[in-house]
């Protein structure tokens, strides 16, 4: 199943700089592992914001929740999920 996910990162301004750097390093490694596994096929920065639009490709809502809640930045994110269904007008989708 495909999900469109918006993630807004809201790190506290007073977060210890070393902790902030560690979180971001771990987040990158976690997301790149999922990208290489094909679970996170699209990742786009929203221009001008500390936020992204992502497409996640997972089995179901439970896997999505497990994946998202494992993000090192999860405690510092607002996340909006939109499940995607096939569009009947898409070329190649059938008659
Ligand atoms: O920077 C972000 O948008 C948050 C998050 C998503 C992937 C990643 O490496 O960090």
Image: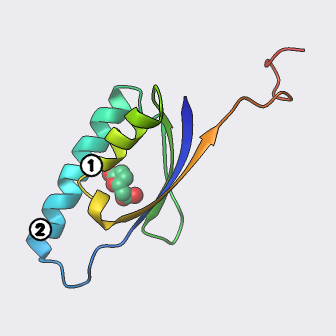
Q: Residues within 10 Å of mark 1 (few under 14, many from 20)?
A: some
Picture residue at 47% right of the left edge, 36% below the top: 61
Q: Which mark is residue 28?
A: 1
Q: Is mark 1 within 8 Å of ligand 1?
A: yes
Q: Residues within 10 Å of mark 2 (few under 14, many from 20)?
A: few
Picture residue at 42% right of the left edge, 68% below the top: 50
Picture residue at 12% right of the left edge, 77% below the top: 16
User: In the shown orientation, is residue 14 left or right of residue 46?
Assistant: left
Q: Residue furthest right?
A: 95
Rendering quadrant holding ligand 1: bottom left
Closer to the camera in the image, 4 or 17: 4
Counting from the top left corner in percent of width and height, residue 33 is at 27, 34
Question: How many numbered marks, from 0 up?
Answer: 2
In the rendered image, which quarter is residue 88 located in? top right
- Distance of label 1 from label 2 (alpha carbons): 14 Å
User: Which quarter shows the C terminus?
Assistant: top right
Q: Residue 78, relative to residue 13: is it above or below? A: above
Q: Which mark is residue 19?
A: 2
Q: Is mark 2 on a helix, strand or loop?
A: helix
Q: Earlier in the sequence, mark 1 or mark 2?
A: 2
Q: What element carries label 1?
A: helix
């Amino acid at each position: 199943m495909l999900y469109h996910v918006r993630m807004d990162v809201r790190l506290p301004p007073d977060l210890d700089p070393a902790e902030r750097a560690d979180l971001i390093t771990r987040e990158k490694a976690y997301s790149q592992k999922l990208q290489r596994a094909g679970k996170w096929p699209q990742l786009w920065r929203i221009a001008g914001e500390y936020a992204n639009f992502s497409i996640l490709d997972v089995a179901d809502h439970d896997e999505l929740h497990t994946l998202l809640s494992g993000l090192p930045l999860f405690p510092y994110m607002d996340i909006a999920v939109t499940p995607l269904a096939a569009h009947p007008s898409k070329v190649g989708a059938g008659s």
